[in-house]
Amino acid sequence: MERRVVIIEDERDVSRLLEFNLRSASFEVHSAATGAEGVALVHLHKPDVVVLDLMLPDTSGYEVCKQLRADSRSAEVGVLMLTAKGEAEDRILGLEVGADDYVVKPFVVREVVLRVTALANRLAERRARPAAGDPGAVLKVGSIELDPVTHDVRIGGVPTQLRPLEYKLLQLLVSDPGRVFSREELLEQVWEMRGDINTRTVDVHVRRLRVSLGPAADVIETVHGFGYRAKRDGA
């Protein structure tokens, strides 16, 4: 099945460049020049990924991302944010409102295509339900079971859907129960962000992950002054 992308970008030259290269990578592509038109296209075509510019004529990419995440019809779509703002705080804000990835302008178009492809693949893997997995590969902490092969997550035996960033964060923590991961380590390994930047985005996503985990939220422990860890069974 052909994968779909919606581009929300008001600079026509940029949009055409992305359209051509994404179509060459076997994506079905639809484009919009405003946030309102883009949201309508997302709900109409149900894409795998949205390539979302931060600066739009009618609203901001932040607001569009919030709208997509708040609507059940688009809450699970992958969002790659394009921003001319290279400051870490701006990139972190994009992740905090629900973007899965970001690229700073001016960008290398090949990188955008690769990131869109990787995001679409991660989402497809998460939706896939293979007939059988390797039971020995399943990570178990408390009532949480996470299969790194199928990306299935179960809580008390009940399937649970997580956003890609939530899944990556949970997988890292439960891969080594009891180990404390600093916020800087989490930013580097989950978000691939390095340097002297504000780490509050980690706290925001840990809070969201705990909400998604529901009754198993207490598996993720805060180690004040250091970071976070997954509770070791029996601890």
Image (tube, grey):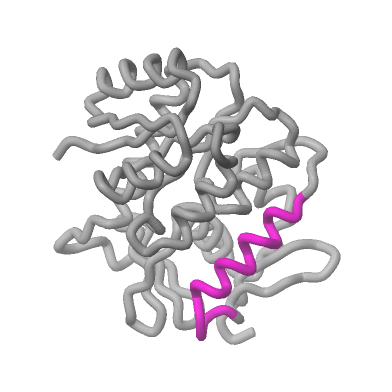
Kindly identify the residue that appears in the image at 46 percent across and 35 percent down.
Answer: 34
Image quadrant in which you'd find residue 189: top right
Q: Position of residue 187 (x, y in %)?
A: 67, 47
Give the left or right position of residue 37, taking residue 80 as reference: left
For this orientation, the residue located farthest to the front is 58
Quadrant in the picture for the C terminus: bottom right
Kindly identify the residue that appears in the image at 27 percent across and 57 percent down.
Answer: 127
Does the stretch in magenta take in 110?
A: no
In the rendered image, is residue 137 in sight? Answer: no
In this picture, which residue range is highlighted in magenta? Answer: 199-217
Q: Main secondary structure of the magenta part?
A: helix
In the rendered image, is residue 28 in sight? Answer: yes
Give the left or right position of residue 81, taking residue 2 as reference: right
Q: Nearer the viewer, residue 182 or 30?
A: 30
Q: Nearer the viewer, residue 219 or 110?
A: 110
Image quadrant in which you'd find residue 6: top left
Kindly identify the residue that appears in the image at 67 percent across and 61 percent down.
Answer: 204
